[in-house]
Image (cartoon, helix red, strand yellow):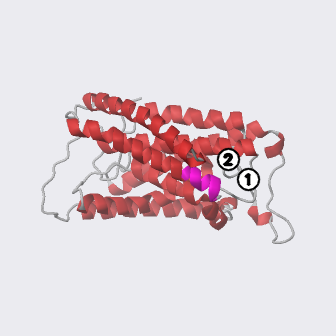
């Protein structure tokens, strides 16, 4: 069996087990939220769909990292052990994102039982392996002179690898949560409605713990663009007026993983400059608010069917939010 065949087989088995456990979690959450039971045919079909999607995504990501150098950057060169460990690390993240997306679509929440252990796993694995980062904690590319010298990279990154790994993963976790919570509050104030649920905050914390602060900021920037496409499809095809925002964040994180090498080469100067970072965050806020505003207008467009969507009081009123169950 080929290398990717083994990966697909392992992913399929792990995905099938995770899908069955997820179905039980969804059933219990719907009871807590006082939602009607899931139709039997959905309960039978959904685990198979989750397994197929998870297997396909993990296999594609592994192929991309192993054979297409989608994570290669000049300043991050892991050892062979670190390289293969990073592949497994990201496969775990993608699996968690698939599970979070599935339950968010069904219950409009992302339970802490997925995101909090995910955060811990991302942080602990980074410290143990010490070579899982896709970018260093900070690199000064303004110091670089073409053909003369490279960017400035602090020496202690290599001397105290566990500390660098802890700082990198921890900063990503904190940045993901703080930025999402900040934009959540600002967007809610501007639109006078709840823009995102707190589960989106913990989801971005989990993503940040696996990918670092630079990648999590790019994820937040890309998510509204993914959301605009998804909302249009959901409204026109499925006539679904309410869509959680968590799946857009998850999809954006996957996009960042597959395109990291090119994205980093195009944006690395921004992450060395405070003004550039401010502009990046401002752009993310503007895109999110614009997306939410457009969706509010788009909901008024008739599609010929009257659909009533019921969910718990914890659910947010906006079309791209994802309310969360209590911790």
Provide the secondary structure element on which disc 1 rests.
Answer: loop
Q: Is residue 64 magenta?
A: yes
Between the C-alphas of marks 2 and 1, the distance is 8 Å
In the depicted view, which residue is nearer to us: 278 or 150?
Answer: 150
Horizontally, is 213 left or right of 8 in the view? right
Assign the magenta stretch its main secondary structure: helix
Residue 90 pos. (x, y %): 57, 45
Residue 326 pos. (x, y %): 38, 30
Residue 261 pos. (x, y %): 64, 60
In the depicted view, which residue is nearer to us: 203 or 65?
Answer: 65
In the image, residue 309 sits, relative to residue 228, either above or below, namely above
Rendered residue at 60%/46% (across/down): 3
Q: Which residue is denoted by mark 1 in the rendering? A: 76
Q: Is residue 200 in view?
A: no
Q: Which residue is denoted by mark 2 in the rendering? A: 133
Number of marks drawn: 2
Q: Is residue 236 magenta?
A: no
Q: Quadrant of residue 160?
A: top right
Q: Which mark is residue 170?
A: none
State the extent of the magenta-drawn residues as a range: 61-68
In the image, residue 127 sits, relative to residue 262, either above or below, namely above
Q: Is residue 80 in view?
A: yes
Q: Quadrant of residue 304?
A: bottom left
Q: Earlier in the sequence, mark 2 or mark 1?
A: 1
Horizontally, is 307 left or right of 221 in the view? left
Q: Residue furthest front?
A: 1
Q: Residue furthest bottom?
A: 146
Residue 165 pos. (x, y %): 70, 40
| Mark 2 touches mark 1? (CB < 8 Å) | yes
Rendered residue at 60%/41% (across/down): 89
């Amino acid at each position: 069996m080929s290398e990717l065949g083994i990966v697909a087989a392992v992913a399929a088995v792990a995905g099938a087990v995770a899908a069955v456990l997820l179905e039980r979690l969804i059933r219990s959450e719907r009871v807590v939220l006082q939602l009607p039971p899931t139709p039997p045919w959905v309960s039978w079909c959904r685990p198979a769909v989750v397994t197929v999607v998870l297997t396909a995504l993990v296999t594609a990501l592994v192929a991309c990292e192993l054979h297409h150098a989608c994570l290669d950057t000049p300043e991050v060169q892991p050892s062979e052990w670190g390289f293969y460990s990073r592949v497994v690390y990201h496969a775990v993240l993608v699996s968690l994102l698939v599970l979070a997306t599935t339950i968010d679509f069904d219950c409009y929440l992302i339970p802490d039982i997925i995101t909090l252990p995910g955060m811990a796993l991302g942080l602990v694995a980074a410290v143990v392996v010490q070579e899982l980062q896709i970018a260093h904690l900070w690199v000064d590319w303004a110091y670089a002179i073409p053909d003369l010298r490279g960017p400035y990279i602090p020496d202690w990154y290599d001397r105290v690898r566990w500390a660098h790994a802890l700082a990198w993963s921890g900063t990503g976790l904190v940045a993901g949560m703080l930025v999402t919570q900040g934009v959540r509050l600002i967007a809610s104030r501007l639109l006078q409605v709840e823009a995102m649920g707190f589960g989106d905050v913990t989801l971005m914390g989990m993503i940040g713990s696996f990918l670092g602060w630079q990648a999590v900021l790019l994820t937040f920037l890309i998510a509204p663009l993914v959301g605009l496409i998804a909302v249009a499809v959901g409204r026109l095809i499925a006539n679904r007026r309410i869509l959680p925002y968590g799946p857009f964040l998850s999809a954006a994180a996957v996009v960042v993983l597959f395109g990291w090498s090119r994205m980093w080469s195009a944006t690395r100067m921004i992450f060395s400059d405070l003004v550039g970072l401010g502009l990046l965050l401002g752009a993310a806020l503007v895109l999110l608010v614009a997306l939410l505003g457009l969706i509010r207008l788009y909901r008024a467009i008739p599609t010929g069917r009257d659909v009533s969507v019921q969910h718990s009081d914890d659910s947010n009123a906006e079309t791209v939010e994802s309310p969360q169950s209590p911790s």
